[in-house]
Image (cartoon, rainbow, N blue to C red):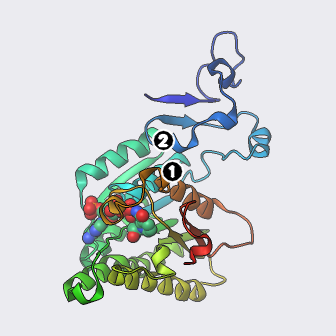
Amino acid sequence: MVTTYFCQDVPSAPGQKKGSPRMKSMGRRIDQIPWRLFGHGLVSRVILGYNPPTAIAEGVRMAGRLRGKVAIVTGASRGIGRAISVALGAEGATAVLAARAGDELAKTAEQVGDAGGKAEIVCTELTDETSIRRLVETTSQRFGRLDILVNNAGITHSASLEETRTEDLDRCWTVNARAPFILCREALPLLKQAERATIVNISSVVGVKGYPLQSAYTASKHALRGMSISLAEELRGTNVRVHVICPGGVDTEMVSRVRPDIAKGELIGPGEIAELVVYLVTHQGNGVLDELHIRRATSAPWFVG
Ligand SMILES: NC(=O)c1ccc[n+]([C@@H]2O[C@H](COP(=O)([O-])OP(=O)(O)OC[C@H]3O[C@@H](n4cnc5c(N)ncnc54)[C@H](OP(=O)(O)O)[C@@H]3O)[C@@H](O)[C@H]2O)c1
């Protein structure tokens, strides 16, 4: 089902003036739009060109704020990375989709297109420095610019520290910390050319606290967060801002593998993380939110306990 809500630029229903809201004829109000479905192929278009002040006053986001911008999203083949890519596309961005599974990246690209954005697939192996460099080079050659870098790809490993092999530690470290480090370094010359650029690194609740049986994953996510803090300091006063998002359990393949004990209904939606990324990359003021913590509503507040 593909549903268009409240579009200014589609033919109006019979008897309505061009640009008048179609919601009434659909029996919907703005606050009844199922925003969580937006960009997932269920609600494909929400264009709030009609009476923008009302839309803003009602706390509804505007579409098209990233038109002309180019974003690299790693881990775009599923889960949180797919949701972020689609949400950026819904704001008009071109999303450069990076991961290994080309067929899954193609599905993400289709969803980005349905949401109103453009997508470019660059199959990338993040354990391979040459592949990471090629991701940036391809972006530069294809688009000549980069405005947004989202280091989202990640892997977990669940075992006690005593049972964690060195190769398990190396794998977590390589994908979760080394790859974002190299990607930031390689992308910075392009990002610095943008009028305003943003790096968003997806750490985790375990980038702030520790969990048993996740020492390799936890160490890598602390490393990513630490690297981000240093980089933000290095880039202070430049056109590039660095942010970290630390989510608790999100409803993706990853969490269903490592935390099957958490009820699916309690998990954070991938679209909720995507909304935070959109907020960070569209925020225009002088204030900066360095880090966002988002936890499951049923978990301990402030990541305590
Ligand atoms: N789900 C959660 O509860 C949760 C909570 C906090 C933080 N996070 C973090 O959020 C991020 C996304 O997690 P998710 O839940 O969406 O995970 P996911 O569903 O397992 O997706 C992981 C993504 O990373 C990519 N990836 C993994 N290894 C790669 C490699 N060697 N080269 C290139 N791409 C690679 C995968 O693509 P391919 O397999 O196609 O390469 C996939 O797109 C991760 O950094 C994770 O640590 C997740």
Q: Quadrant of the C terminus?
A: bottom right
Viewer can see residue 73:
no
Left or right? Give the position of 108 relative to 46.
left
Left or right? Give the position of 29 relative to 144.
right
Q: What label does residue 32 carry, if any?
A: none
Q: CA distance from mark 1 to mark 2?
A: 8 Å
| Of 133 and 207, the residue lying toward us | 207
Which residue position is annotated with label 1? 87
What residue sits 29% from the left and 70% below the top? Answer: 134
Mark 1, residues whose alpha carbon is within 10 Å: few (<14), some, or many (≥20)? many
| Of 162 and 94, the residue lying toward us | 162
Which residue position is annotated with label 2? 115
Q: Position of residue 170 (x, y in %)?
A: 25, 85
Mark 2, residues whose alpha carbon is within 10 Å: few (<14), some, or many (≥20)? many
Q: Quadrant of the N terminus?
A: top left
Amino acid residing under circle 1:
Ala
Amino acid residing under circle 2:
Ala
What residue sits 39% from the left and 85% below the top? Answer: 219
